[in-house]
Amino acid sequence: MTTEPVYLHAASEVGPLESCGMIHVWHAMLDSAFAGRREYFEGLLSPDEHERAGRYHFEKDRNRFVAARAILRTLIEGYSGLDARRITFKYNRYGKPLLESDDGQDLVFNVSHSGERALYVFARGMPVGVDLERLRSDVDHSQIARRFFTADETSVLEKLPEEQRLDAFFNGWTRKEALIKAMGQGLAFGLNSFDVSLRPGEPPVLLRTRYDEDDVEHWAIGDIPVESGYKAAFAARGQDLNVLFYVFDPDQAGTVYP
């Protein structure tokens, strides 16, 4: 599994996204991507996306929404060949976006953003989810865990040394969020219906599913390398995955390894 980011500016520069367990994860910095590209990015959005952008009170948040949707459209165009301006989305009953057109060639995707950072995950014919969170120490993580995590996960968390609990909590939260997003049900599907590993340094694993004990064999979860101060994870319904990580950078063409 590749862990070093690759700098590219369009999905068309990447090798083919095949159906045999291949996953592409993209990391984008929304503020820098938006700078100097307002007119172009806004030109990619649909009327309903412009309407959604207009609901944001602060310009910074509006610009980030525009950038996030424009980058999503750009990446989908690269993978599918669909015109970024003509892509239409449909949403399931829980709000998960899907491609309206069958011309997307079974392309599946998911998006998460926190502040100026966004993550995109792509696969073909395989449910995938992604979650990105900024590490926040100003909330009561123990209380949140007792409300949303399983009793076993909460016990593990509370037995850890104090200095490890923040990392452990967000390990658990991002892995669980990525999984329920892959399932397409969001928080309508209880976070306490399955257990994940969360100890710092412990491999990301779906330990057990309380709704169907056999379903644990069908899912894989993994951490995404992100900047210090953030946690991120992906989930996919599949095994033996080939996961590649990329950084979306509109100012750099070609492939550059850091």
Image (cartoon, helix red, strand yellow):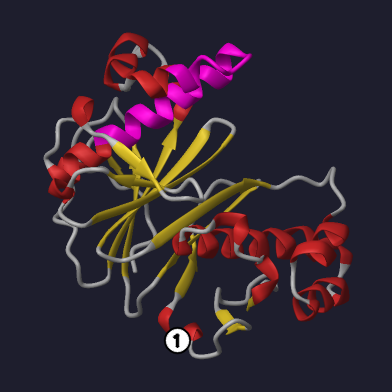
Classify residue 168 by image quadrant.
bottom right
Above or below, comparing residue 12 to residue 54 in the picture: below
Residue 55 on the magenta span: yes
Q: Which residues are magenta?
A: 51-74
The N terminus appears in which quarter of the rendering?
bottom left
Question: What's the residue at 57%, 21% (across, down)?
Answer: 61
Q: Is residue 11 visible?
A: yes
Number of numbered discs present? 1
Q: Is residue 33 visible?
A: no
Instruction: Say whether residue 165 is left or right of residue 7.
Output: right
Classify residue 157 by image quadrant.
bottom right
- Secondary structure mainly formed by the magenta segment: helix
What amino acid does circle 1 point to? Glu
Residue 54 on the magenta span: yes
Q: Position of residue 216 (x, y in %)?
A: 50, 84
Instruction: Say whether residue 170 is left or right of residue 250.
Output: right
Residue corresponding to mark 1: 217
Report the front residue among 219 and 158.
219
Instruction: Say whether residue 26 is left or right of residue 254.
Output: right
Question: What's the residue at 36%, 64% (across, down)?
Answer: 127
Q: Position of residue 2 (x, y in %)?
A: 33, 63
Above or below, comparing residue 165 to residue 230 in the picture: below
Q: Position of residue 110 (x, y in %)?
A: 40, 50
Question: What's the residue at 82%, 56% (across, down)?
Answer: 141
Report the front residue among 83 and 134.
83
Above or below, comparing residue 31 to residue 119 in the picture: above
Classify residue 41 by image quadrant.
top left
Instruction: Say whether residue 184 is left or right of residue 38.
Output: right
Q: Secondary structure at mark 1?
A: helix
